[in-house]
Amino acid sequence: MLKVVYYKVCLGIYLYDQDPLCEYTERPMQPALKRKDAFPPPAQSRCNKNGHRHHPLTYKNCDATMAVHHTCHDTTIEIHHKGLHDHLKPPPVRVPPEAKRELKNGFNSCRTRPPARP
Ligand SMILES: [Zn+2]
Ligand SMILES: [Zn+2]
């Protein structure tokens, strides 16, 4: 089974930072710039709890890295977080179009490899 592993820097998270008990989080959007030190754009959404929806989510950056394992065999994506993320866990991955494209490219390169002969 062939695996493609991408190493990525954690993009951090959007969170409501006015209340330490608030557990609302969102995955950040991709930065507009393709630079390592580029920050995602400010959050567009808010926590919808009473009293929370007046304040936009705050972006929190993170230096930890993660390894994304794409398995050619069954088209799964596993994300292995490495290092210390000092923020809440982001919600589960809804595969963004960009990742889908990347995934497809990954699979294409899997397919173009000659099959192993017994
Ligand atoms: Zn909240
Ligand atoms: Zn992180």
Image (cartoon, grey):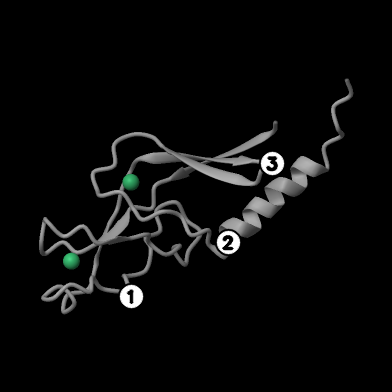
- For disc 3, the neighbor class at 10 Å (few under 14, some 14 to 19, many from 20) is many
Rendered residue at 25%/49% (across/down) = 88
Residue lying furthest right: 117
Mark 3–mark 1 Cα distance, whole angstroms, equals 34 Å
Give the CA distance from mark 2 to mark 3.
17 Å
Which of the 4 image quadrants contains residue 38? bottom left
User: Mark 1 highlights which residue?
Assistant: 44
Instruction: Name the quadrant of the C terminus.
Output: top right
The numbered mark at residue 72 is 3
Q: Where does residue 114 sit, x and y in percent of width and height?
A: 87, 34
Residue at figure coordinates x 70%, y 39% from the top left: 73
Q: Nearer the viewer, mark 2 or mark 3?
A: 3
In the image, the residue with mark 3 has its CB under 8 Å from the nearest atom of ligand 2: no
The residue carrying mark 2 is: 98
Position of 7 with respect to 4 (left or right) is left
At mark 2, the secondary structure is: helix
Residue type, label 2? Glu
For the residues labelled 1 and 2, the Cα–Cα distance comes to 19 Å
SS label for mark 3: loop
Contact between labelled residues 1 and 3, with CB atoms less than 8 Å apart: no
Please provide percent x and percent y for residue 36. 44, 51
Horizontal side, residue 50 vs residue 83: left or right = left
* Label 1: element kind: loop
Label 1 CB sits under 8 Å from any ligand 1 atom = no
Determine whether, in the image, residue 42 is placed left or right of residue 20.
Answer: right
Q: Residue at x 65, y 59 (%)?
A: 101
